[in-house]
Amino acid sequence: MQHLQRDIQRCPRVAVYGTLKQGCHNHYWLEGAERIGLDHLTTLTLYDLGPYPGAKAEASTGSVVEVYTINAEQLALLDQLEGYFAHAPRQGLYNRAIFSTQHGEAWCYLYNAETKHEARIENGEW
């Protein structure tokens, strides 16, 4: 839990782009988080993985994200949902990295697997 405390002190926000967005089926994981706005990140590319999208840190025309203020408990829950392993970030389904948004720096979950056969979401919104 100590790494989560450091992570949340370093960056108390998360940028979401898929099933965690308002109106989507996993949004309840952000219960109690404060939505502070939208942004279009040109440093993020979305891929269609079927039931959910995956993001890569690649240049794009802009991927739509919702930015939320969160706490350490919420970050831990999101890590669990996204299959992120703090002790081995490259071995989980997703890794996380900090991206600059117009609302400040925010954690964003990046898909670890290759995306050679997945379609790019060109309009940036899943």
Image: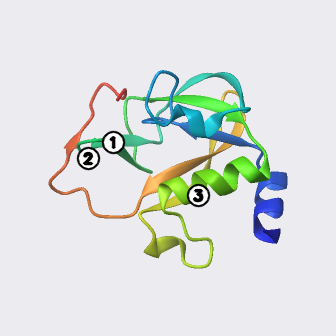
Residue highlighted by disc 1:
52
Would you place residue 105 above or below residue 36 in this image?
below
Q: Nearer the viewer, residue 71 or 117?
A: 71
Q: Nearer the viewer, residue 103 or 8?
A: 8
- Pinpoint residue 102: horizontal percent, then vertical percent: 67, 27
Q: Residues within 10 Å of mark 1 (few under 14, many from 20)?
A: few
Is residue 101 visible to the viewer in this orientation of the structure? no
- Pinpoint residue 75: horizontal percent, then vertical percent: 68, 51
- Pinpoint residue 93: horizontal percent, then vertical percent: 41, 63
Badge 2 amino acid: Leu
| Residues tagged 2 and 1 counted as in contact (Cβ below 8 A) | yes
Badge 1 amino acid: Tyr
Residue plotted at (63% across, 36% down): 30
- Pinpoint residue 62: horizontal percent, then vertical percent: 42, 29
Q: Secondary structure at mark 1?
A: loop
Residue plotted at (56% across, 59% down): 80
Q: CA distance from mark 1 to mark 3?
A: 16 Å
Residue highlighted by disc 2:
49
Badge 3 amino acid: Asp
Would you place residue 2 above or below residue 87 in this image?
above
Mark earlier in primary sequence (2, 3): 2
Image quarter in which the C terminus is found: top left
| Residues tagged 2 and 3 counted as in contact (Cβ below 8 A) | no
Is residue 3 visible to the viewer in this orientation of the structure? yes
Residue highlighted by disc 3:
79
